[in-house]
Image (spheres, helix red, strand yellow):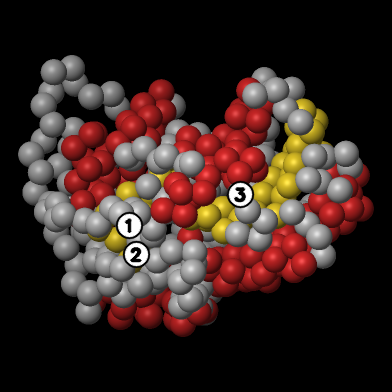
Amino acid sequence: MKVFLTGGTGFVGSALLRALVARGDEVTALRRARSRIDHLADLPVRWVGAGITDEEALSRAAAGAEAVFHVAADLSYSRRDRRRQFEANVRGTRAVAAAALRAGARRFVHTSSVAAVGICEGPVLLDETSPYNAAFLDIGYFETKREAEAEVLRAVERGLDAVIVNPSVVLGPGFGRGNASAIVLAVAKRRIPFIPPGGINCVGIEDVVSGHLLALERGRTGERYILGSENLNYGALFERIARISGVRPPGRSITGGLLPAFVRALRGLDRLGVVGRRVRPEALATLGRFLWFDSAKAQRELGWRPSPIDGAIRATLEDFRERGLLLRPVPGRPNAPSRAGSPSLPPTSRP
């Protein structure tokens, strides 16, 4: 199959790119001029250097494609990047969808995010039909991913056979933006000082790739599919990572009352431009809340079968060790005892 892929140098995109090549697809991939492709140099891919809103270049790159995977996105959580993020996530999606229509692609798979679904104050599972309720957070990434989905649905009305997938927090080995595995490294190096309230849903990169491929073959036009494996509060997640790493998990918790005040102060400083880009107050605003999701629809309609995240955590740790970012464990050293609680949690899908 002839495939056009955007975002092929990123974390999810590069993993998907390798899977497409492995199954024999002929892939054309879009890249920015400054994007690294040395880690993908072994792949027989036709690379096209162009911006995500360059309609003429997109039309040339997508010509003849039977399938289009739009994975590219601006993942910034900085308020200062709002304009750039809108251009990439909203206008870029509009341009890629239009190019797919002109190419006559038989299927368009759009990589969205659970950020476009919503967020909860308590441990409640959201699904594809949940009303979007995160506008009050005023987070650029959430808002632009939501608007990008609207662009896809407008293209569906014009005849595009499009499906949307919504991965949760993706863990696994690999390079590129979009890799949330830094949290694994931080826990393994004992760099997280406290356990925040709230929780997230995590999923392994291999499962996200399989979800994309299943959406290509089995997804219903105009539908969205959540790709999420396990719903965990932060204490349980940190404990899981620490146990597999052989270290102690963080033992202190921060109360829900202190966190909002801290985030408000950081956001005020960010508006004044005195907060470094490594500090992301918009991301911190989600702490204390729950990004828990139900993936039953993807399991039921696509036949998607997510694995527990332990395998993704182990693969991530091994990748960090191979890259020299984490020392190898001492042979025979037992896992350190846990101090963090591990309450029973609801599964990722309802029975």
Point out residue 35 in the picture as x, y percentages from the top left corner.
69, 41
Identify the amino acid type marked 1.
Arg
* Dot placed on the residue nearer the N-terminal end, 2 or 3: 2
Decide if residue 258 is on the left or right side of residue 38: left
Point out residue 145 in the picture as x, y percentages from the top left corner.
59, 65
Decide if residue 45 is on the left or right side of residue 224: right
Identify the amino acid type marked 3.
Gly
Q: CA distance from mark 2 to mark 1?
A: 9 Å
Q: Does residue 219 lie above or below 224 as drawn?
A: above
Q: In terms of secondary structure, where does tag 3 sit?
A: loop
Can you identify the residue that label 3 sits on?
A: 219
**Taking the image as drawn, is residue 169 in sight?**
no
Q: Say which quadrant the N terminus sits in.
A: top right
Q: Residue at 41% of width from left, 23% of height from top?
A: 322
Q: In terms of secondary structure, where does tag 1 sit?
A: loop
Q: CA distance from mark 3 to mark 1?
A: 20 Å
